[in-house]
């Protein structure tokens, strides 16, 4: 195989001799390069190929395998460096930042929380409480007036939905955030996605965090919850 | 191949939740993680060819919910492994 690039999975610390899981993307062998106590896991890949779903899963599998033994900083899928020397260069250039960030995520895992509600129904309920005149277009009114009325209503419903999402999102997020080392999230990424959040949780606090999740779920019976994890710290690996 | 991600459900229920797991994996690996910039970089997440369709899916979690069929998100207590 003509090596045209070096696919990079993650930065990790710990002993360089530690075995790494495989196979990697495109069925490749996973290798490591160390600089001090920081390693990069990588594979040779040839040029001009198309990524597949399987490669994404292999990327994740390699990162998780490393995560079982070390702190890891996962790279974004598809990170390819030009040559093995480039890996060393990146390590030399970035190892202080890798090291600091590895320290930050050490012993922690990411947990994903997504919360859904039925935005259409909510909007209907909000609209029903609007004053009569703002609820629907008047049949005989000039088109301009009806247009403005429609715009006002859309704007109003969206604003109200945002306020509700902020309030309910806070109710859900606050107790979880307290159990997490770090948290990030947003409300209303789409109308139905009330909250989409990630939490960086100490491994030994994970059981407690799960208990908080169940409490939060139980206290919001009208909402749909999706919990996922534990993940490598994808959302907290920014260096 | 086996899913690398943890079983989302303690009862080991396969298909639909596995699909959701895949969406979650894609969401993380394609949109998050460390980005290395510089001349040494050939590509970073230059994967829009095949994954364009999947990315569109990812923008809406409702899709994931639909993929999961009749199952409710929070049904099983053991979503975390």
Image (cartoon, helix red, strand yellow):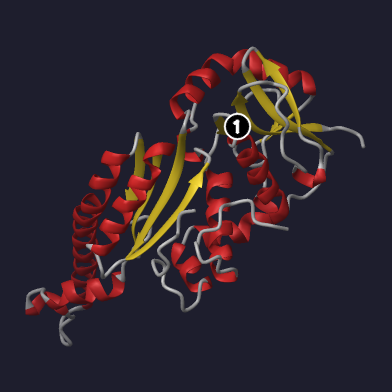
What x and y, as percent, mark residue A70? 58, 29
**Residue at image location 18% in from the left, 63% down from the top:** A156
**Residue at image location 73% in from the left, 50% down from the top:** A51
**As rendered, which of B39 and A59 lies closer to the eye?**
A59
> Where does label 1 land, which residue?
A69
Where A38 sits versus A53, above or below? above
What x and y, as percent, mark residue A28? 81, 40
**Residue at image location 45% in from the left, 59% down from the top:** B79
What x and y, as percent, mark residue A74? 58, 35
What x and y, as percent, mark residue A100? 48, 19
Mark 1 Cα shell of 10 Å, populated few (<14), some (14-19), many (≥20): some
**As rendered, which of B60 and B26 lies closer to the eye?**
B26
**Residue at image location 51% in from the left, 71% down from the top:** B68
Q: Quadrant of residue A131?
A: bottom left
Where A127 sits versus A206, above or below? below
In the rendered view of the protein, which quadrant contains the N terminus of chain A? top right
**As rendered, which of B2 and B30 lies closer to the eye?**
B2
């Amino acid at each position: 195989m003509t090596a045209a690039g070096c696919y990079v999975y993650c930065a990790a610390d710990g002993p360089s001799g530690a075995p790494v899981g495989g196979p990697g993307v495109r069925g490749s062998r996973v290798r490591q390069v160390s600089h001090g106590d920081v390693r990069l896991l990588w594979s040779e890949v040839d040029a001009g190929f198309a990524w597949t779903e399987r490669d994404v899963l292999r990327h994740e599998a390699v990162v998780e395998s490393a995560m079982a033994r070390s702190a890891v900083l996962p790279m974004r899928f598809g990170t390819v460096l030009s040559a093995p020397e480039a890996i060393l260069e990146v390590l030399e250039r970035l190892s202080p930042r890798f090291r600091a960030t590895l320290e930050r995520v050490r012993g922690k895992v990411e947990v994903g929380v997504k919360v859904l509600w039925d935005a259409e129904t909510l909007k209907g309920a909000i609209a029903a409480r609007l004053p009569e005149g703002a609820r629907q277009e008047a049949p005989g009114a000039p088109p301009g007036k009806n247009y403005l009325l429609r715009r006002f209503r859309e704007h109003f419903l969206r604003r109200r939905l945002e306020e509700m999402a902020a309030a309910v999102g806070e109710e859900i997020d606050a107790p979880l955030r307290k159990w997490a080392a770090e948290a990030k999230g947003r409300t209303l990424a789409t109308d139905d996605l009330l909250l989409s959040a990630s939490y960086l949780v100490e491994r030994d606090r994970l059981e407690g965090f799960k208990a908080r999740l169940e409490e939060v779920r139980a206290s919001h019976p009208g909402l749909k919850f999706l919990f996922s994890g534990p993940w490598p710290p994808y959302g907290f690996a920014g260096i | 191949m086996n899913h690398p991600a943890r079983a989302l459900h303690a009862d080991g229920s396969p298909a639909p939740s596995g699909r959701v797991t895949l969406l979650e994996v894609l969401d993380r690996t394609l949109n998050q993680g460390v980005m290395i910039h510089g001349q040494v970089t050939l590509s970073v997440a230059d994967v829009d060819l095949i994954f364009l369709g999947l990315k569109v899916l990812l923008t809406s979690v409702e899709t994931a919910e639909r993929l999961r069929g009749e199952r409710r998100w929070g049904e099983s207590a053991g979503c975390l492994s």
